Amino acid sequence: MFSASVGPPLLLGPAFAKAVDHLTARSGLSPLARHCRAFFCPVAAHRFAYNIRLSALPAAPPAGAIPMIASRLALPRIVAACLLILCSLGAQPALGETRELRVGIYANPPKLMLDPAGQPSGILGELLGEIARQEGWTLVAVPCRWQECLSALGEGSIDLLPDVAHTDERARTLAFHKTPALHDWSSIYNRREAPIVSYTDLAGKRLAVLEGSIQQAYLGELLTGFGIHTELVPVASLQAAFEQVAAGTVDGAVANRFYGDTNAATFQLHQSTLMFQPARLYYATRKAANSEVQDIIDGYLERWQAEADSPYFRIVGRWIAAPAPSVVPREVWLAIGGLGLLLLLALAGNTLLRRRVAEKTEALASGRQALVHSEARYRALFDNQHTPMLIIDPVDTQVLEVNPAACSFYGWPAETLCTMTLRDLAALPATATADDSDIGQLFSRQRMADGREREIEAFWGPIRIDERELLFAIVHDISARKSAEAQLRKLSQVVEQSPASIVITDLAGNIEYVNSAFEQATGYAQSEVIGQNPRVLQSGNTKAAVYHELWLTLGRGETWKGEFENRRKDGSEYTELAIVAPVRREDGEISHFVAVKQDITEQKRLRAEVENQRLSLEVQVRQRTTELHLAMDQAEAANQAKSAFLANMSHEIRTPMNAILGITHLLARENPTPQQAVRLGKVNAAAQHLMSVLNDILDLSKIEAGRLQIEHTDFRLADVLDHVAGLINESAVAKGLRVDVAPGNVPISLHGDPTRLRQALLNYASNAVKFTEQGCIQLSADLLTEGNGSLLVRFAVQDTGIGIAHETIPQLFKAFEQADPSTTRRYGGTGLGLAITRRLAELMGGETGVDSEPGVGSCFWFTARLQRGKSSVTDSEPVDPRATVIKQRPQPAPAPAGDEQVLAALRRLPDLDVDAGLHVVRNKLGQYLHLLSMFSELHGNDIDRVRGALASGDRENARIVAHSLKGVAGNIGAGDLRQGAARLEAAIKEGQLESQLEPTLGAVEQQLQALLQGLAKALPKPEQSPAEIDWPLLRQLLNELEELLRMADLEAYRRGTEQAGKLRAALGPVGDRLVGEIEAFAFPEALETIIEARRTFPTLANPRPAPASGAVNSAQSLGGT
């Protein structure tokens, strides 16, 4: 049985059909004639099959069988068969039925466009034209733009629209066939001088995108998800997009690869490395309309794409040089078989067969050559692509082929990569359960050859190579983008969750964003204010000048800070503290304004309330202070009167007591009876005790009344210690106690008040004997510091007695106080001894203290300021030039006539700001000249003093000298010297070694000497000497007064009144005011006056105030000894 499938009917006309009927009737082939006539007639069926039965022929005919068959066939029968074969080979199809299709055509070469005749052209246009030609359809081209085409298809104005990508949204209204007509993807085309290599490069850019295309929606969602702000500019056509890029009005254009590859060179554009959104393209119709057209198109595409030499590949190859088929079509073999039969019948058929074979052979060779060129072209495209690309087996994810960019990206050579699978490349978590079919997870994060891991974004799709269904993948490194996204998310969360209101506006002030804090603060929802101007919040209470200053500041590109009086949505008013700043693009241009605002209504209310309370409290404090001052004055007056009375009555009290003790002693020597002796002993003991109490009370009163004067005489330390030890020795031995004396490292000869030292030590030693039952008592002295001709000596009495609890120690040195009331009952005593010792130590420039442990013993100590005494034994001691009393210091004489010359000379000095120095002394030239003269005399050797202190290891003293030089230099207006001294002080603080400090020391020394030389030439020569003033001791007195005044200690009153004459003599009007303020208990004002005194007399400036207790009696020698 031989059967053939015959194509569409032939349009040969009725005359030819009658000829066929005649021939077939004569040959007796009436069934074949009927089929043949139906084949030739235009009204015959669309397709049919005919059979030529050759069942009578043997499977292998013997020799001469064919001639025998031929001899049997009459000539008409042979002619009919030849006509049938010729018709089957050379027939042209005819329309089976008439259908008119309105086809939307928009310009998207090479896929779709209109030819010069107005017919569909391009790949999809010609494919549709071929189908229409074979189906007998009439195509009516309807030119339109893309968005117009989509709208026309939805409205039914057109029947069919080629080049439509399938999306779920479109599938709701449009119908698609099953087999895609083309595979495509998108890319971004830009000018070469503005490359785009990653999605983060799109930030702030403008991209032209075809309006209504899937690229527009896809990129909008993608970039929004990444937090990348890119302006998508809709255009009507891809040509318009490329024109805008070439003109520079946009930064890039989004286009499919067919259009981009064909037209990029024309516009001198460059394809970026970003390729995305693989798409399948279809012929779309309206849903539920023209479904049979979709079925027919689907049938042709499915059959043509399976045949290498089909019209599909010829058309695609003609437009983009697609691979040509290498398979010989079945029709060729049918033609060859038919021609073979025809050769048996006529020599003419043989010639026709040769010609057709030659034509087909030439076509196959041309196809193979096109295939070679096409493969070379796409190989070059694959290898030269800057984006990593992989060919993958979808079955096991084996990597089959990679381009050089992929090797560079992963770090492995191609040979290694082609032995790996996607699972080998994937950096999966330990808990990951993805299999090889989960391509997305395998591509989410991948490892490199050097061990690093990168976040990637991959686009993949099917590709057919050598009859194999594979996957192609395009890989982008998005690690930087992921990091940027994380930062953007964090920033977004911070902005959204900020407790402060945040508002972002455009340059015209229109609101583009507000956070939730703004909604809570104002009552307006975000949707209510977007696009509005912030003036919707204005209450009318903010001055116009505020807004004017705001816009002036922003216009200068600066940040503005101020307050607004605004109104909420509910009408309530509030105050906002706002900071408004410009936001700049990468090119520096201002694109937006951002405002950070905070509601400070409650803060302002509280501040006002606190201010009112403060003012009220100040009034009350001043009133109460005045009352307290009055009460203190009264109490101090009463105490002074009491103390003065007791001090004045000391003679009247002691004289009778001495008489009682003397008479008692005389009676005891006149042989009294035993009973009388006992009674006299009791009287003597009671009198001795009473005398001791009276002495303590009177001494304390004398001290409080200021009647106790400290003597200044030479004495030997050993005499003081031995005397006290001798006084307590008898009672100590009686209790079995040992008394030791340790003079320590104190000089042998001292200058001070030995009587008060003995009294203070005796108070301690008597208590030690009283409260010690066993062990020993030690009297000791130690030299703590020495400087400026003064010794700070620490005297101590150590016992092994009952000890004192730590919580009771603070009460010990108060008058009439003891550690424990039971102590008085057991041991007796008034509690005045320690208080007297404290006052004596203070009068001698020292302080008191105790270290004790209950059950172990106590160590009572006090310090005193003494001097070295004159003796036959000379003790070596270093001489500090700073301790020398300033005597007969020369001062510049008033010279009004020469003031201008002096000022002119001073102004010529390079490192001296005369105006700044005059400002310190309130423009008093005489004081300023005196200040400069004192600076020259006192600070000329400061750098040597710093070096000496550093050499001896005394870094603190070195720092103090540098600090003092810094302060004095600032006071006289020597700015450079002040900065150098500040650097030196900071370097000493940092602990730099002496060798490291030497460059700084040298630089400061050079500045100092240059200034001193200039002052020596500019300042007038001294002409007179002022009265002798001991400025260091005066400075110590002011330090003491300042400390007492700050603590509101009434002792400041006594100190100030005692030294009133010396303060007035040294400080002049400033001293008068200071004494008056202290006597009036105006302590805050007195503190200000002390500060003014230091400004007026810079010599009094003290870099570090000394403790009040350390210089109490230093003022005793003020003004000379």
Image (spheres, rainbow, N blue to C red):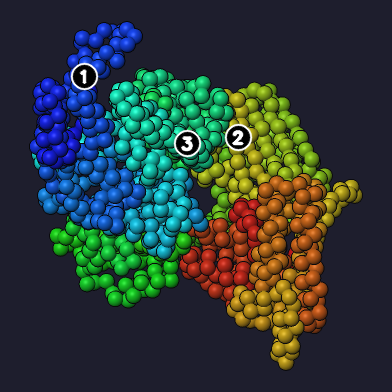
Give the amino acid at mark 3.
Gln
Give the amino acid at mark 1.
Leu
Q: Earlier in the sequence, mark 2 or mark 1?
A: 1
Residue bearing mark 1:
73
Question: Left or right: where does residue 547 sit relative to residue 766?
Answer: left
At mark 3, the secondary structure is: helix
Q: Residue 712's spot in the image, x, y percent?
A: 74, 56
Q: Is residue 230 above or below residue 693?
A: below
Residue bearing mark 3:
369
Q: Foreground: 58 or 631?
A: 58
Residue bearing mark 2:
851
Give the amino acid at mark 2.
Asp
Q: Foreground: 1101 or 830?
A: 1101
Q: Residue at x 70, y 51 (%)?
A: 988
Label 3 near label 2: C-beta < 8 Å? Answer: no
Question: Left or right: where does residue 322 sit relative to residue 653?
Answer: left
